[in-house]
Amino acid sequence: MSLVNGLARGHAGTLSPRRRKRAVISCLECHRRKQKCDRGWPCQHCRKRGKHTLCSYEGAEPPGRSLPESSSNTEHSTGSSIFAPTLDIDRRRGENRSALSCSHGEDLLARDFGYSTNNRHSTLGVLHTIGSPGAYESPCTNPVESSSEQPEDMSLKYRSLVRQLPTRAHIDILLETFFDGVNWHYDVVDEITFRDQLDVWAQVPYSTLQKGPVVLEPDIRVFPALLFQVLAQTLLYHPSDDERLEALKYGTGMTLLDVAKELSAAGNEVLELLGKRGGTIGTVQAGLLRAAFLKSSGQVVEAWHTLGSAIRDAQELGLHTSECLAESARARPGTESQVAWDRERRSRIWLLLHIWDFHMAVVLGRPSLTTAPNDKFSFPRDICQRQRGVLPTERADQDPPTPFSVILAGYQAAYRYLPTIHTIQTGGARVEDYGTVDQVHKEITKNIRSLPAWCRPDHPDMRFDLLPNCTWLPAAREALLSLVYFVLLALHRPYIFTHAESRSRALRAGLEILRSQARLFYLSQPRDFKVFNMVYASLDAIVLITAIYLMFPTENTEILDSSLSGIEWGLGRLAVLGDYNKMAKSAHGVVLNLYGRLRSRIAGAQQPHPPIAAVQTPGPDPWSANVGRGDFGPRVDPVWSNHVVPDHTWDFAPEAVPPPHPMQDLFIDHLSSGDIVAPDASIDPLLTGGAVDMTADSLHFAGTYADDSFWSFMNSLVP
């Protein structure tokens, strides 16, 4: 008796298939529409029509792709019984060997030999076709048993790690901050699913933990790693003077940032202890949040490596294909809404990984691991905020946007071009590729004009901003615009020293970034200054604007005044951020060095310019004329307006100088600058009226950059 027929008979008491002479092998939707079905779950036609939830088969499972579950499984009162731990591991193994011999054999082959479960043309796919994987028995019957740790050692280490979790009272305090003001940044965690898992984890008895993680269901086994990362990420943004969290500091002088680092490290240790076998979606989420924590802490290279590991974990689960959605539904039977939301969650996470992958590849000049979504990938939809027991619903214009609506808007407008930009960048900025650059630029600028009203650059619709569940939207809007214009900046970066049109377009994109960053700065609280996210965009824009005017001072003079204002405002922000993190201080020194060179470069005007101290301190209103959506407002020193810059010709070919990559140079090549000294060394020279030390030593750029880099060239010039 085949596995399919056995399943049909096994479910006869609960779901009787229609009687007919010929078996229906298509899904019911394709059978109704008389279309050829590829028997996937969801099948090809249901995916294309967006009818994932309607894709079902007679007998409840697609033929030959079943994973039977005990009929005694019922939904938890909170909708989370799919995660409840099964404590009788021996009984479960026995059921696996008898009722699941075929699918269990596939799992064991994939686990022990590394075969992909998502490729029909691999050896495992062939074995699946002929129905023979059940003949294989593995010496390792549980994913975590393959660890080099002995069961007793693993149990002891696992318990020692989870003991580092804060109390439930502290967790609840931090989760309120996380879901109100942190999760919107990346929208990695679904609140309903996460809180259900937290309730289940809280009910796991100590006697079960003594047996080790092997007896826990995979989602609950990994959950502490995800919880650690959520708490660590939250502590980066939580008010540091919250007395309710004082108990988390166990040492004199310890800060919440120190606590965050320890919690994140503990979460990473949990993942390492459990190993790569038997991963879950929680494994991927924990890895992505760990990468976000490292990036926010200024450890960008480490974040890139961690992101790569999370991508491999996601590929192991098949998140890059639609087949993973069927696996999710079969492995965790529940309500129709649970299954539908789980599908959306998985496709969302893969899109996030893809965007992160190419963004970091472009910024750091590193290789990528993912490919652009294709027809095998079920693209996530823009749906309304999740409600328990309600199926995903397409979001209409009158519905408030969600954090993922912001991500989708950015992807459709600009992020989807990052793979093309990466190809151009790694190809060496060939002249023959410039036609592609021009075409992509036109498409992105057109897409920016077509952004939804609530996130458009000019006169956005702010009717949702004051809604209780949209308090994050003003900051998210500015973060979105910064990233969209960063894509334009990255598109033209390889050509800024060879094509005048790219210089002009890069300058304007950089100014838009600085305007958005100025508004975002005043929407933020001092507690937000501990993270490095506000440093990245400003540093890239300021360095490229300054570099362009240093190399080509006679071009784009009509926006020179706006550019200088933008640089000065950016310097002011970096000076403030530098009081909260060291990397911002390093970035400020590099930018101040370049700005000093630029002022020396254009000092040939007949009228003298005022000292650096003339920079205005920005006002508190982010929508004032000073930082509005037009320009940075009037400058204190109008001498710069409309003046003619002397035509100084370099004794070298500018096109021979490679363009700067500030993030790569700062975080990989350890770029730094000498101190630019003011009369009172305790006061930042940017904010004082005194002269600054512009000696050769103070203008020297240090680091491990190449001899032919932009920074080496700057060092070779006489100020």
Image: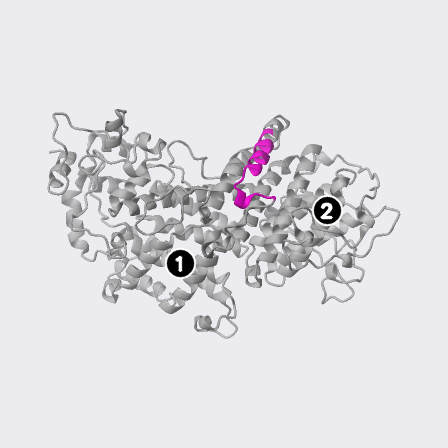
Q: Looking at the image, which residue is at 46% across and 66% down?
A: 259
- Which image quadrant: the N terminus? top left
Q: Quadrant of residue 550?
A: top right
Query: Is 261 above or below relative to 606?
Result: below
Badge 2 vs badge 1, beta-carbon distance below 8 Å: no
Residue at horizontal 37 percent and vertical 65 percent from the top: 165
Identify residue type, mark 2.
Ser
Q: Nearer the viewer, residue 50 or 514?
A: 50
Label 2 secondary element: helix
Which dot marks residue 267? 1
Residue 387, percent from left and from top:
35, 51
Q: Tag 1: Cα neighbours inside 10 Å, few (<14), some, or many (≥20)?
A: many
Which region is colored magenta?
A: 439-458
**Quick check: 251 left or right of 39?**
right
In magenta segment, residue 152: no
Question: Residue 595: horizontal and vertical position, in percent?
Answer: 73, 51
Q: Residue at x 76, y 63 (%)?
A: 688
Label of residue 710 in the image = none
At which x and y percent is residue 619?
68, 59
Do we see residue 248 in this rendering? yes
Give the main secondary structure of the magenta stretch: helix
Q: CA distance from mark 2 to mark 1?
A: 46 Å
Q: Which residue is mark 2?
A: 562
Viewer-side label of 2, 1: 2
Q: Position of residue 216 (x, y in %)?
A: 26, 56
**Position of residue 553 in the picture relative to residue 507 (left or right):** right
Q: Is residue 273 visible?
A: no
Q: Is residue 149 above or below residue 370?
A: below
Q: Earlier in the sequence, mark 2 or mark 1?
A: 1
In the image shown, does 37 or 390 lie closer to the viewer? 390
